Image (spheres, grey):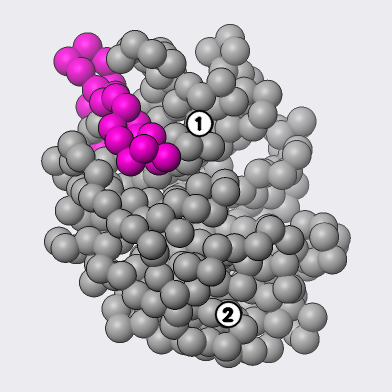
Amino acid sequence: MEVLPNSWHTGPIADKDLKPVHDRPIQTIAIRNDLAVTGAADHSLRVWDLAKGSHVRHLYNKNFGHKEWVTCCSFLQDQRIISGGMDGILCLWDRKAVRCDNLTEHTGSISALMVDNNNIAISASYDKSLIVWDLHRLRPLINLPSTAPVTCFVWNNSLVVSGERDGKVLFWDINTGKNFYTMGCHSGAIHKLCFSVDGGTNNFLASCGKDGKVSVCDLRDNNCVFNQQLHRGAANFVAGTLSNTLITASADGVIHVLDMYMGFQERLSMKANSPILCGEVLQNLFVAGCGDGNLIVYNLDSGEACFGFGADNTGGVNCIGISPNKRKLLTGGDSGIPLLLSF
């Protein structure tokens, strides 16, 4: 396992507000190597060099770009960027020029987006569909018609699992385009899905949602093995760790650490002073972005807070990105100012 810099346990060695800033709240971050992209409610994206802490380019002009909020973004292998927005458009941006090709099959706001190493992409939308795209040819390959607005999804080989606004979790085989299983454990919108590690394989699918519930499905037999109301507020985060634990975090400010080998019994819990809006698991650490603008790093073994940092001076921290070498962390929040922390 890669050794983290010691400063992850004590606090960043440097911090920098990146400029120029977005005019409105930052909604999404993607990172590839030393490049990052932020997408915001000002309809634009900005590309950053994390090593230099400098601005690279602004992806928006009167002829190209989104007409509404940018909701999601991702890098391709060749460092091109694809973004999705509330306008229902996917923009595939040129590597150098501020121009893009528009993919316009969706008719509602795009909620999530993923791209694999072969330039195959999947997008999810409030138009009640997921679409599999061939980005080489700029055309849709498969349309997966859902039964309600799709809020999130995860993807592993031919398996796609989507979460809906009505609380259902749908399992898809993208080779056939068929929905082969539906799980209805939630009473409100699904906020997050994850494949949880069990002995090195993706055997569990965990979900959390607006109802504060956390559910786990065993993918070997599609059996729901855990379904409990863990939070008093909307559960916004769920992720597995390499130590066979499941981490959940919520608008109630509570973080739970569950033991997957012990029937999902709670190992420990932690409490932030404000809602947790987003998070990332980094080995035995949990990085929480909070509604009061703070970034807090917790030790998942001891339950103690390693450090806190004021990341946004206007409102909440909406998104977090960590560089592959674990030396940089980028936050985006309501102020529209990206904060770069170095470790």
Task: Between residue 142 and residue 84, name the one nearer to us.
Answer: 84
Tell me: residue 318, above or below residue 286. Answer: above
Please state if 168 lies on the left or on the right of 309 as rendered: right
Where is residue 11 drawn, in percent x and y?
40, 70
What is the secondary structure assignment of the residue under circle 1? Answer: strand
Residue at 57 percent across and 46 percent down: it is 324
Q: Quadrant of the C terminus?
A: bottom left
Residue 76 in view (yes/no): yes
Residue picked out by circle 2: 300
Residue 36 in view (yes/no): no
Residue picked out by circle 1: 75
- Earlier in the chain: of badge 1 and badge 2, it is 1
Question: Does the stretch in magenta take in 250?
Answer: no
Residue at 40 percent across and 30 percent down: it is 83
Where is residue 107 drawn, in percent x and y?
38, 29
Rendering quarter of residue 311: bottom left
Residue at 67 percent across and 68 percent down: it is 241
Rendering quarter of residue 273: bottom left
Where is residue 295 drawn, in percent x and y?
35, 68
- Span of residues in magenta: 47-74
